[in-house]
Amino acid sequence: MNRTNVEHFTSLEEAISSLFGEDVHIEQKGRIHGGDINEAYRISLSDGNTIFMKMNQKENLSFFQKEVTGLLAIQATNTVSSPKILCTGTDDKREISFLLLEMISGGNRLSDAWEVFAHELAAMHRADTKEFVPNGKYGFLEDNYIGAGEQKNTPGDSFIPFFREQRLEPQIRRASRYFSRADLKKMDALLSNLEKFLIEPERPSLLHGDMWSGNVITGNDGKIWLIDPAAYVGHPEADIAMTELFGRFSESFYETYRQEGLIQPGYSTRRSLYNLYHMLNHLNLFGGSYLQSVLKIVDAFS
């Protein structure tokens, strides 16, 4: 797995001509709505191809570089499908950075797509992770992003210290202005006693990291594909917990995934603690409307 194998171009025109031919040009560019970080476009080319472009300000190229690393990690497991990466780029004239990907048609979903996805995700969670954390068991090759928030991935040999030091503590520090002294005291106590509530996984798992319904899509083969990862190696339950944070997937997904044996006893109690990370991130990104949800979780473990 090597991000340097993904080509980088210094203009959108250079990218199109290099990937599809010197005579190929953009015929139509249509905005696709959704997401709150990047602009997205469906691009129709003069040779009949259609591709997908994510775009941001030029200085935010790292958003796309980190996404590429996450997609490559998922693809390296040969389990769950994700879009083919075409290239990254910057464009001085437009003052943008961009990521070009295979266009996903979002056609008809297979009748057993959720069951197939559950098996494939379990296979991803069982895949060897040594390539993704060379100096430890948990973490990742590099820091990346959870939404627009920075996500630290310094490697460690145990999951619970990793979750404390790389997940909860940075988010609590960023959100400290929202908390009273009493709130912070409860959070310090929770962090100190995290071993009472979390358990070490049976094995490290590559996680999508931002597993909510907006980041799964019907692929061109009718199966469910993963997009927009915030990848790292952690406990597989953390991926499953997030699927239950903002709504739920199909019940057949949960029934099938449970049969894979990766959910350990007591998950229903731990679930909200995994999701505390995401609620803290939403508090930091979107403001005080998430404060009560954060405090409710902390109080449940006090």
Image (cartoon, rainbow, N blue to C red):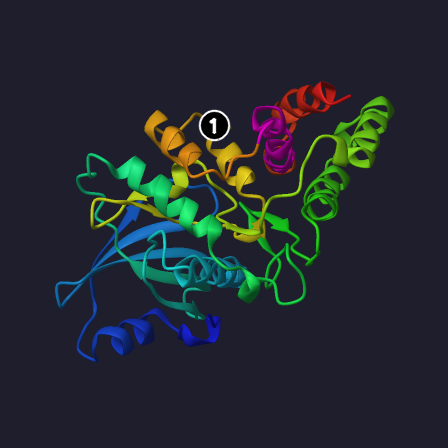
* Image coords of residue 262 (percent x, y): 50, 39
Front-most of 83 and 23?
83
Which residue is drawn at the image coordinates 63% and 22% (left, top)?
A: 293
Is residue 10 visible in the rendered image? The answer is no
User: Eyeballing the image, is 12 above or below 18?
Assistant: above
Mark 1: give few (<14), some (14-19) or many (20+) Cα within 10 Å: few
User: Eyeballing the image, is 1 above or below 22?
Assistant: above
* Image coords of residue 226 (percent x, y): 38, 48
300 relative to 205 in the view: left or right: right
Q: In what element is the residue under mark 1?
A: loop
| Amino acid tagged 1 | Phe
Which residue is drawn at the image coordinates 39% and 75% (left, top)?
A: 7
Prevalent SS, magenta region: helix
* Image coords of residue 120 (percent x, y): 36, 47
Quarter assignment of residue 175: top right
Residue extent of the magenta highlight: 265-282
Q: Is residue 110 magenta?
A: no
Quarter assignment of residue 84: bottom left
Front-most of 279 and 75?
75
* Image coords of residue 204 (percent x, y): 58, 51
Q: Is residue 267 magenta?
A: yes
Which residue is drawn at the image coordinates 42% and 76% (left, top)?
A: 5
- Which residue in the structure is indicated by mark 1? 246
Front-most of 274 and 121?
121
Is residue 265 visible in the rendered image? The answer is yes
Where does the C terminus fall, quadrant-wise? top right
